[in-house]
Image: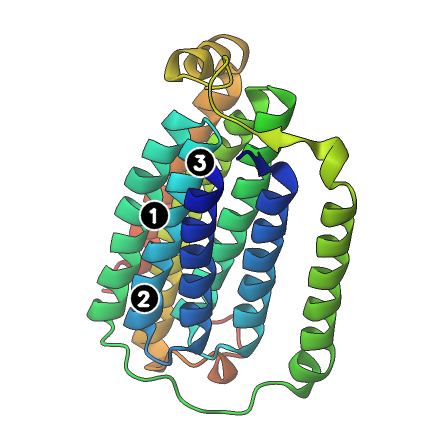
Amino acid sequence: MYLVIFFIFGALCIGGALNLLLQRHPINSALSLIVVMTSLAVLYLLLGAEFLAAAQVIVYSGAIMVLFTFVIMLLNAGEEERTRGSRAAYLVGFPGVAALLGLLTCIFLSVRTPLGNAQLGGGTLVTTADLSRVLFRDLLLPFEVTSVLILVAILGAVALARKES
Amino acid sequence: MFVPIAYYLVLSAILFSIGVAAFLIKRNIITVFMSIELMLNAVNLTFVAFAHQWHQVSGQIFVFFVMVVAAAEAAVGLAIIIAIFRTRNTLNVDQMNLMKL
């Protein structure tokens, strides 16, 4: 059952990512990225990360992708121009990416047995209470520092996108 | 019917490679930015898979911080894209070769 759900949503992830790569209009790429992120949320649920699954839907496919689609519509971004990219990207980039993928896949599949299986139940579910206990007790300072980071990012975004007077 | 952890790692390797490929061949700056988000998501999946394997909460804490930083990065990056579009009137990365606005 888990295997079936994993394959369905894993295929959705890969299909969405390939669609992002192949579409020429940015709005289609943005919508397929939303598919990838929502299927990843289901995979997080399969791995017992319930808080992260909710946060993935709210933060990534909610906030960030709405921001992306908003900017695409605001800038009226049309079809991508077909210009020749750098030759190095095609000559070195693609063989490099293929080699990286092959190497990683070989390594992961060769250590498949020691890595073990993912299973739900039996206390493997990390609840929001467990997560917040670590986050707000042991890691309180980093958490507060990230709130300062977000404040700085808001100020930076406003300062950058402001019209020059 | 358990799913091996290795399958999750292979899936995230595939997603990361697609992200790198999209980063290399896409010519629209917004799509390039979206492929960076795709790579971040692939790494998040690895973190969650290993957190599940070792029964550790800290892996999920990492993902939480990555999400926070990605949200901040998206806001600033899109603001920069808007500022560039206002002065250059293009979104093509080939025509952006100066850091000056």
Which residue corresponds to the image point at 61% horizontal and 38% vertical from the top-left?
B4
Q: Are both tags, 3 and 2, on one chain?
A: no
Which residue corresponds to the image point at 51% horizontal and 18% vertical from the top-left?
A124
Above-or-below relation of A164 to A120? below
Which residue corresponds to the image point at 48% horizontal and 24% vertical from the top-left?
A120
Q: Which residue is mark 1?
A: A38
Q: Which residue is mark 3?
A: A44
Q: Amino acid at mark 3?
A: Tyr
Q: Nearer the viewer, residue A49 or B28?
A: A49
Q: Amino acid at mark 1?
A: Thr
Between circles 1 and 2, the one closer to the viewer is 1
- Quarter in which the C terminus of chain A is drawn: bottom left
Q: Is residue B49 left or right of residue A149?
A: right
Does the rendering let one see residue A148?
Answer: no
Q: Which residue is mark 2?
A: B82
Q: Nearer the viewer, residue A31 or A165?
A: A31
Q: Position of residue A133 (x, y in %)?
A: 45, 9
Q: Amino acid at mark 2?
A: Ile
Mark 3–mark 2 Cα distance, whole angstroms, equals 33 Å
Mark 1–mark 3 Cα distance, whole angstroms, equals 10 Å
Q: Nearer the viewer, residue A88 or B16?
A: B16
Q: Position of residue A80 (x, y in %)?
A: 37, 84
Where, by quadrant of the figure, is residue A92 drawn?
bottom right
The chain containing the residue under callout 2 comes to B
Asked if the residue under mark 3 is in contact with the one under mark 1, i.e. CB atoms within 8 Å, the reply is no
Mark toward the start of the polypeptide (1 vs 3)? 1
Secondary structure category for the residue under label 2: helix
Secondary structure category for the residue under label 3: helix
